[in-house]
Image (cartoon, helix red, strand yellow):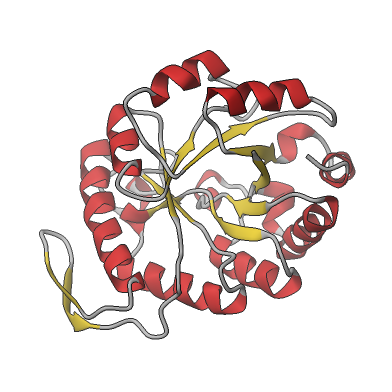
């Protein structure tokens, strides 16, 4: 099993320099990934950082750690822009980028900008958007005529050599979508606790084949039995949740610096 950090982009973590500090501490302590939320939390009157600008800063200030969004709501982004951002991020951090994608979005992140917040509408945009993003990232010439997006003979250059895509969500549709890509980013924790047991995870994995299975959770140093239980259930990544609900920044940094 590999170990990553999933950081909030809200509140204390709306400061990009804090993200750099946490990511560098994670890299020194032996974590394998630094991921970041993608929420427009200012619609809830909370300070928030743009995840892509922040990831660029993290890419330029780390050397080894995997980086990426966890997860981006594709439905509120133009897929050609996302592909371009990912390819540029890969140039800053070659072979260190993973793209976490899903329906995403808390209440208001679509609606308050006049966009359809319904799950069906978001799923349509997600599925077609992912097709466009993957095609562009291939570096091949793309011709696409879909219900929502058009690509008229475009080749993205330079394209990354390989950039894995993890799909978030817990539904059967989300798992089926993840099976078409490189991994499943399982939403196994709320803002305060684990919500899926190892036994439940194992049941959800039945009938599916994923390159990677990332579970989100909360642990303290030395809880190897907890990590092992999820690994035995089929998880290949443990993603530690980091946000203001876990205490002040010093408390969180102490957890990060203690290592997986």
Q: Where does residue 203 sit, x and y in percent of width and height? A: 42, 17
Q: Where does residue 16 sit, x and y in percent of width and height? A: 71, 64
Which sits in the foreground, 21 or 239?
239
Task: Say whether residue 115 is visible.
Answer: no
Q: Is residue 209 left or right of residue 229?
A: left
Q: Is residue 132 left or right of residue 10?
A: left
Q: Where does residue 206 sit, x and y in percent of width and height? A: 37, 22
Q: Could you tell me which residue is drawn at 70 percent across and 41 percent down?
A: 243
In this view, 234 is above or below 41: above
Q: Is residue 249 left or right of residue 85?
A: right
Q: Is residue 173 left or right of residue 19?
A: left
In this view, 152 is above or below 119: below
Which part of the image, by quadrant, shows the N terminus? Answer: top right
Q: Where does residue 201 sit, x and y in percent of width and height? A: 49, 22
Task: Say whether residue 205 is visible.
Answer: yes
- Image mark count: 0
Which part of the image, by quadrant, shows the C terminus? Answer: top right
Which sits in the foreground, 109 or 100?
100
Q: Could you tell me which residue is drawn at 59 percent across and 34 percent down?
A: 216
Q: Could you tell me which residue is drawn at 78 percent across and 53 percent down?
A: 26
Give the quarter of the image for residue 237. Answer: top right
Which sits in the foreground, 138 or 146?
138
In this view, 61 is above or below 213: below
């Amino acid at each position: 099993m590999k170990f990553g950090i999933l950081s909030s982009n809200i509140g204390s973590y709306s400061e990009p320099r804090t993200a750099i500090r946490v990511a560098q501490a994670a890299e020194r302590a032996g974590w394998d990934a630094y991921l970041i939320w993608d929420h427009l939390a200012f619609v809830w009157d909370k300070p928030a950082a743009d995840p892509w600008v922040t990831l660029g800063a993290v890419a330029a200030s780390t050397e080894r750690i995997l980086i990426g969004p966890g997860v981006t709501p594709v439905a509120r982004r133009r897929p050609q822009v996302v592909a371009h951002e990912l390819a540029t991020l890969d140039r800053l951090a070659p072979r260190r980028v993973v793209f976490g994608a899903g329906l995403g979005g808390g209440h208001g992140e679509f609606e308050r900008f006049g966009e359809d917040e319904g799950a069906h509408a978001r799923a349509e945009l997600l599925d077609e958007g992912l097709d466009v993003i993957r095609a562009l990232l291939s570096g091949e010439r793309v011709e696409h005529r879909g219900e929502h997006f058009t690509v008229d003979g475009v080749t993205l250059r330079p394209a990354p050599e390989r950039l894995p895509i993890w799909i978030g969500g817990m539904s059967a549709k989300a798992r089926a979508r993840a099976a078409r890509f490189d991994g499943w980013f399982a939403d196994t924790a709320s803002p305060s606790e684990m919500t899926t047991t190892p036994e439940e995870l194992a049941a959800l994995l039945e009938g599916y084949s994923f390159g990677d299975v990332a579970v989100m959770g909360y642990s303290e140093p030395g809880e190897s039995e907890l990590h092992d239980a999820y690994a035995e259930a089929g998880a290949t990544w443990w993603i530690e949740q980091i946000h203001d609900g876990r205490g002040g920044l010093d408390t969180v940094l102490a957890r990060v610096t203690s290592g997986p």
